[in-house]
Amino acid sequence: MKNIENVKEHLIKVLGGKKVVTDQDILDQYGRDETPEIFCKPQIVVRAETVQDISTTLSICYEAGIPVTPRGAGTGVTAGAIPVVGGVVLSLERLNRILEVDTKNMVAIVEPGVITSDIQQAVGIHGLMYPPDPASLDMCTIGGNIAENAGGPCAVKYGTTKDYVLGLEFVLSDGTIMQSGGKTVKNAAGYNIIGVLLGSEGTLAVITKIFLRLIPSPTVTYDILLPFSDMDQAIENVCNILQRHIIPAAIEFMDADALQLVRNYLKYSMPFPDAGAHLLIRLDGHAEAFVAQELEELSKVVSVENDQMYVAVTSSQKERLWSARRSIREAIKKESSVFMAEDCVVPRSEIPDFLRAIKNFCYAHGLRSIMFGHAGDGNVHIDILKGDMDIQVWHDRIPEIKREIYQRALDCGGTITGEHGIGYIRRDFLPLAVDQKQIELMRRIKNAFDPKNILNPGKVFPKKHTEWS
């Protein structure tokens, strides 16, 4: 790649050798994320420690026309943090400070490399809550959550990452440092730049500081496990619950195949292990009487006998229930190191028909599928396992499998991803969900932020005959 050696020397001179990594073994670690099979080695890794480090790195790379891939913890599953065209990986892992927890304004100011669960724990001490809770919250960083507009189980009641970002400091591809928003709850001064950056997958700017809206923590939580004979019955109950004005903090589902896989992985007995589907519901609030009343209303609405409702109240009981849901991905990896992770979203009422169609397709083609996700907002995770299938056959079939899943979601009134994003592995399927005029509008936005196309090139947009595609 042209100019890469000059850029390396320049970065080492300006930032110092401890921040600029060229050791081949270490470079390997930054060539992959949680996306199976994809590996692309960067020429250089910059472990930035300050916003000025980021500005300097981008300025140098912009001048030389060298691609830069921003990276958090590398927990994504769409190859979004992989340098598919080489160049520089700009790691934000060392910008990991919680700068302030402002209890009066209920705002936390954090750097992008902070682990999401660390934020939750830090604000929890003050009786406050940062609700977004992706399954990887003990590993993923808040900057990555911003890049993907991450969701999680609590999205049904509390919303996703976008609902809690009041302000962002960010750096453009040429090194210019900017800030939009701050501690104020309202901001109508011009275009919503924050909204444009949320979910932009590192293609528009590098986030360096985040102002997060906090809310009071609920003081009472109940977790309830409900078994059903099949997914149709489970989702019918979800619709009934929400129509009765019961708004759980979370409504998660697991199909029978997911239940069997997790049971084998965890090596301990789960409640109702032979059910056709599970719903895991969390009720929360600020008064015991209120939550208890919601639980009573729930028991009247659902088509499950009271002795079939498992209510977890103690922390150990709750952990036992949620460990099953949160360990699905690890159980899948153990079963098949190569798999395809999809996260389509459809209207809630369409979940059974959607899952049935995909399950039948998989059976007909000799594929093993694991289905789970967020029943409360229609975000369905479909993992297809390679198992012992020949690797070349697997690669040849992936486009067909993806297209089938995406088209079924679109036919149900949904779209191709709810929270994982487009990244690299889905970019050629974006035209299924977004028309050409919108894609061209997105390209114009990209050009306005990053006219040389050095930020995370090769991601989001379908292939085009340009230097980095």
Image (tube, helix red, strand yellow):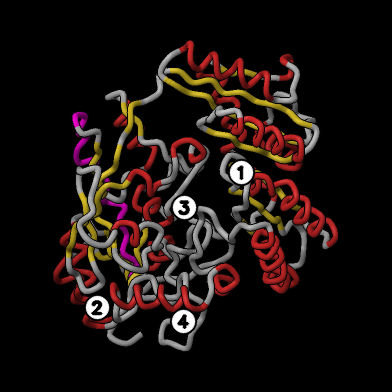
Whether residues under marks 1 and 4 lie with C-beta atoms below 8 angstroms apart, the answer is no
Q: Circles 3 and 1: CB distance less than 8 Å?
A: no
Query: Is 103 contained in the magenta span?
Result: yes
Which residue is at the front of the view, 137 or 379? 379
> In this rendering, is residue 225 above or below 192?
above
Check residue 343 for magenta coloring.
no
Q: Tell me the CA gap for discs 3 and 4.
A: 23 Å
The x, y position of residue 40, in whole percent, is 47, 71
User: In the rendered image of this protein, does residue 290 appear above or below residue 223?
Assistant: above
Q: Is residue 410 above or below residue 156?
A: below
* Residue at horizontal 14 percent and vertical 69 percent from the top: 14
Residue type (three-letter) at the residue carrying disc 4: Ser
The mark closer to the camera, 1 or 2, is: 1
Whether residue 77 is situated above or below residue 376 in the rendered picture: below
Specify which label sits upstream in the sequence, 4 or 2. 2
The residue at 54%/13% (across/down) is 292
Mark toward the start of the polypeptide (3 vs 2): 2
Find disc 3 in the rendering and name its residue.
75
Q: CA distance from mark 1 to mark 4?
A: 33 Å
Q: Say what amino acid the circle numbered 1 marks.
A: Gly
Q: Residue at x 53, y 70 (%)?
A: 434
The reply to whether dot 3 and dot 2 touch (C-beta < 8 Å) is no
Front residue (pair 296, 217): 296
Circle 2 sits on which residue?
A: 62
Q: Secondary structure at mark 3?
A: loop
Which residue lies under the disc numbered 1?
A: 373
Q: Which range is magenta?
A: 88-104
Q: Badge 2, how many Cα within 10 Å: few under 14, some, many 20+?
A: many
Question: Three-letter amino acid code at disc 2?
Answer: Tyr
Quarter of the image containing the N terminus? bottom left
Q: Amino acid at mark 3?
A: Thr
